[in-house]
Image (tube, rainbow, N blue to C red):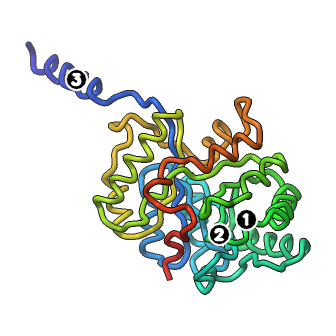
Amino acid sequence: MSYFASVIVAACLSVSQTPMPVADIAIIIDDIGYDYRNSRAAVELDHPFAYAVLPFSPHARDLARLANDLDKNVIVHLPMEADADNHALGPGALMMGMSQPEISAALSESLAAVPYAVGLNNHMGSRLTRQSDAMGWLMQAIVARGDLFFVDSRTTSGSVALQAALQADIAATARDVFIDNEQSPEAITRQLAALVKRAKQVGHALGIAHPHAVTIDVLRNWHPLEAGVRVIKLADYIANYRRGSAGLTVASAQTTTTECGDESEHAATAEYPHAQR
């Protein structure tokens, strides 16, 4: 066999050893905007991840602009009152006791603080996302501001945020797996495997991670195609796999979100790593 023929055969074998993707995943990197070095490194990762930017954080505008320049999705990481650790919320938080006009005004200010945002997800929020009135008011405010989608970060199993979004006819979904609650390469690799497993089970899955140095290192060296999944942009994920589609009712979609892949590993009532402060 000639040299060139050998090269072609080797290349073909190499391609054939990489499995065709059988499921889609999307990953959101939360808490962008405080730690500039790690946030920028996260934004510059090769995969088409989405970046949830904390409004009014010191580097929010610069990092949102960079993500947009790199054709990455930007979303607002909207702070909402939690059961504990509310000192970590940062500016612009939606709090218990706020009126409907106050929630609407706070949303407008947060959207103005994060350029290029195409959607939102909640930062913390284990208390507020259980409140149907507040979530209903928030979703009405989102509808009034145009074509935005919503992702329920699902920091509590009692969240009604997804249900409220679907009732308002907002394109919406909820996360399946938190990737880096435990910050070690081994734990993060296990959670990525859980995300892949979930995607293969149902055809798609959504993960959330944070701009920790160890997370960035693992994601930089991660090869999803070798695991049989394809990373797609969050906007495409929402368009293809929004909850409530494919015949699901609002009620059945809500039930689905409380049975996601990492419930057994991480109690759903916990507040997960919030901010790089």
Label 1: which secondary element: helix
Which circle's residue, 2 or 3, is located before the other in the chain? 3
**What is the CA distance from the residue labelled 1 to the residue labelled 2?**
7 Å
* Residue in the picture at 13% in, 20% down: 6
Q: What amino acid is at disc 1? A: Arg
Disc 3 vs disc 1: which is toward the camera? Answer: 1
- Residue under the point 75% across and 68% down: 111
Q: Nearer the viewer, mark 2 or mark 3?
A: 2
**What's the residue at 81%, 70% (across, down)?**
108
Circle 3: element type: helix
Question: Alpha-carbon neighbours of circle 1 within 10 Å: few (<14), some, or many (≥20)?
Answer: some
- Looking at the image, is 112 positioned above or below residue 177? below
Residue hosting label 1: 130
The circle drawn on residue 5 is none
| Residue identifier under label 3 | 13
Q: How many marks?
A: 3
Q: Neighbour class for label 2 at 10 Å: few (<14), some, many (≥20)?
A: many
Q: Secondary structure at mark 2?
A: loop
Q: Along the horizontal axis of the image, is 270 left or right of 143?
A: left
Q: Quadrant of the N terminus?
A: top left
Q: Measured along the vertical axis of the image, is residue 101 above or below residue 201?
A: below
Kindly identify the amino acid type of the residue bearing the numbered disc 3: Leu
- Lower position in the chain sequence, tag 3 or tag 1: 3
Image location of residue 130, percent across then percent down: 73, 65
Contact? badges 1 and 2 (CB < 8 Å) = yes
Q: Residue at coordinates 64% horizontally, 38% vertically from top-left? A: 241
Q: Quadrant of residue 13?
A: top left
Q: Nearer the viewer, residue 241 or 35?
A: 241
